[in-house]
Image (tube, rainbow, N blue to C red):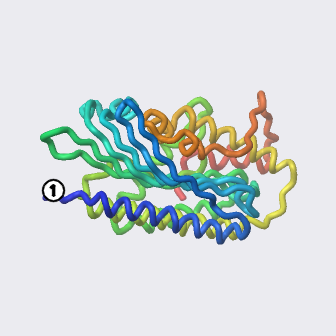
């Protein structure tokens, strides 16, 4: 395969435009709250430089709290979380840019959602750069609807189709494996797509894929919000939602590579931890009644399935 030129400028432009597109779509769906923006810049004595735009929406009609973050980080030495997986890149200069978002709705019948698209470059003097794309999106329902999960995965499958018959199956399985809590022996939700180290298609085709993933998140999530946001709920559903949000916190703080990389690479802590829900709860030996709606989640949805 002929080496293709890397167009960092176009990736940066796409990421900033995607952030705005997603925020506008979510504001329209919420109908009340607006995203507030913080621009930030970090420089450290260790050669780390970071800048970005953090946009957060709170106390809306639909969204209790959510964040859509753009970040662009550079450094003279790769963080340990990156060299663990790619030891051959130890000592390289690096550059990372991406959009990452988490939306925590108020209504327990509307799932939490997460999406991320990112571009990474590692360089050593006198050698060609090593680059790759990563990202995906996944859905975390509390009171799941079969048709919502099917629709979510159908969008994922359709956007993957132009890139190869095998892509959806591979990236769906990768998502199931990645968003898994070993200490709970359960998936974080019903999955979607996840991929990393993507460069084998060449720069242009890989870039087209993350564009499709970014748009796919909007196409997959907004119809679910629209369908479920007005369902009445009681304190019982709210308490269960907060309990299940605890699992989200556990995954992000213990296992999530993006969170760990962000904290190690000089990113802005407030922006990195924007993925945390505004409220969550833990309860010792929480008991779920058999054959209840809450039992339905763990029994039928928190394990990999073919949708």
Percent x, y of residue 213? 44, 62
Q: In the displayed structure, does residue 284 sit left or right of residue 9? A: right
Observer-nearest of 85 and 82: 82
Give 148 or 49, whichever is nearer the viewer.
49
Instruction: Identify the residue at image location x=38%, y=64%.
Output: 13
Which residue is located at x 35 percent, y 30 percent?
84
The front one of 179 and 72 is: 72
Question: Horizontal placement of 95 versus 141: left or right?
Answer: left
In the rendering, at what x and y percent does residue 217 appear? 52, 63
Where residue 248 sits, quadrant-wise, is: top right
| Quadrant assignment, res 76 | top left
Query: Mark 1 — residue?
Result: 3
The answer to whether 114 is drawn above or below residue 286 in the figure is: below
Eyeballing the image, is 199 above or below 216? Answer: above
Q: Horizontally, is 2 left or right of 34 in the view? A: left
**Quarter placement of the C terminus:** bottom right
Q: In this picture, is 211 found above or below 136? A: below
Residues packed near mark 1 inside 10 Å, few (<14), some (14 to 19) or many (20 plus): few
Residue at 54% over, 51% down: 191
**Residue 172 visible (yes or no):** no
- Looking at the picture, how far across and down is residue 140, in whole percent? 62, 51
Residue plotted at (42% across, 44% down): 50
Question: Which image quarter is the N terminus in?
Answer: bottom left
Task: Find residue 145 and report its horizontal and vertical position in percent.
Answer: 68, 60
Quick check: can you spot residue 15? yes
Question: In terms of secondary structure, where does tag 1 sit?
Answer: loop
**Total residue callouts:** 1
């Amino acid at each position: 395969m002929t080496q293709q030129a890397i167009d960092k400028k176009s990736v940066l432009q796409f990421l900033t435009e995607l952030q705005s597109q997603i925020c506008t779509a979510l504001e329209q769906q919420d109908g009340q709250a607006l995203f507030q923006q913080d621009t930030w810049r970090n420089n450290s004595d260790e050669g780390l430089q970071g800048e970005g735009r953090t946009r957060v929406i709170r106390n809306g009609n639909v969204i209790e709290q959510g964040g859509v973050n753009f970040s662009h980080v550079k450094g003279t030495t790769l963080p340990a979380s990156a060299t663990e997986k790619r030891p051959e890149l130890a000592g390289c200069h690096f550059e990372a840019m991406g959009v990452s978002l988490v939306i925590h709705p108020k209504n327990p019948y509307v799932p939490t959602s997460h999406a991320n698209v990112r571009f990474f470059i590692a360089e050593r003097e006198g050698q060609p750069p090593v680059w790759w794309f990563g990202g995906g999106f996944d859905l975390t329902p509390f009171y799941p609807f079969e048709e919502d999960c099917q629709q979510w995965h159908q969008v994922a499958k359709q956007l993957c189709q132009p890139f190869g018959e095998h892509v959806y199956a591979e990236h769906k399985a990768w998502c199931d494996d990645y968003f898994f809590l070993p200490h709970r022996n359960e998936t974080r939700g019903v999955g979607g797509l996840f991929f990393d180290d993507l460069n084998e298609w060449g720069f242009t085709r890989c870039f087209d894929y993350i564009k499709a993933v970014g748009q796919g998140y909007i196409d997959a999530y907004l119809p679910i919000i629209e369908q479920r946001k007005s369902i009445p709920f009681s304190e019982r559903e709210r308490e269960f939602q907060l309990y299940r949000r605890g699992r989200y916190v556990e995954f992000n703080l213990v296992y999530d590579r993006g969170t760990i990389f962000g904290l190690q690479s000089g990113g802005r802590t407030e922006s990195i931890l924007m993925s945390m829900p505004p409220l969550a709860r833990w309860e010792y030996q929480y008991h779920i009644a058999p054959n209840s709606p809450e039992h339905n989640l763990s029994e039928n949805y928190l394990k990999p399935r073919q949708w």
